[in-house]
Amino acid sequence: MTPDMLSIFIKIPTLETKRLFMRKILIHDCADMYDYSRRPETSRYLLWSAHENLKYTKKYISYLQSAYRNEEFFDFGLIDKESGKMIGTCGFTDFDMDNNSAEIGYVLHPDFWGKGLAKEAVLRLMAFGFAELRLHRITAKIMTENTASKRVAEKCGMRHESTHIEAMLIKGNYETIEEYAILAKEFYGKRIE
């Protein structure tokens, strides 16, 4: 990551959408994060397993505070404006600065699925990535069975670019991964409803 980009994340900004605030994950988000992270359906297609207990979630959020300080973590907590609860995360999981590209990831509380909130968060993150970080390309890697996540990527204007058969060993199984991508010029050239 370039020094200019790091300076943006020294104090992670708060982003806003119609229904969400996107901000740094805080210790007081522990109960909200545990509420969705403990559910097997939440982590079914993710690299991590369901959180075992509230203590584990608190320890994880404490670790995140250190990662934020060390400029090693670039995820936003998704705060539902109506309830004030943290209902998921959306952020950058990896940067390829040689090619001015970043990978995004997102997770949402199952009680909020099917409402267009993941799309809302991803579009705002993309706008931030292209406008503020001056990225050229944004990608997402999605397990092939995760049809809901692939729909989010497509609704945000991303195109399917490749399929990697049994490319990642996740929770003891070799999973097929599909890669989606969008370029800055495509993001600004498309009207996404």
Image (cartoon, helix red, strand yellow):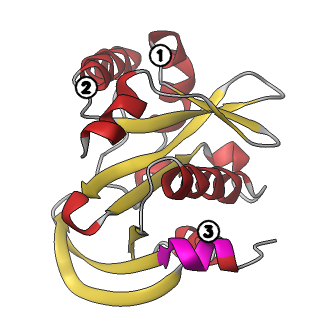
Q: Measuring from the top left, give residue 45's x and y in whole percent.
A: 40, 61
Calculate the distance from the C-alpha at mark 3 to the C-alpha at mark 2: 27 Å
Q: Judging from the image, what secondary structure is the residue with disc 3 in?
A: helix
Instruction: Please say whether residue 149 is one of the residues in the magenta stretch.
Output: no
Q: Which amino acid, mark 1?
A: Leu
Q: Determine which residue is flagged by label 1.
A: 26
Residue kind at label 2, given as amino acid type: Ala
Residue at 52 percent of width and 85 percent of height: 159
Find disc 2 in the rendering and name its residue. Answer: 67
Image: 78 above or below 92 = above
Q: Which stretch did the figure color magenta?
A: 182-188
Q: Which residue is mark 3?
A: 152
Camera-side mark, 3 or 2? 2
Q: Position of residue 177 (x, y in %)?
A: 31, 78
Quadrant the C terminus occupies: bottom right
Residue type pointed to by label 3: Val
Distance from Cα at disc 3 to Cα at disc 1: 26 Å
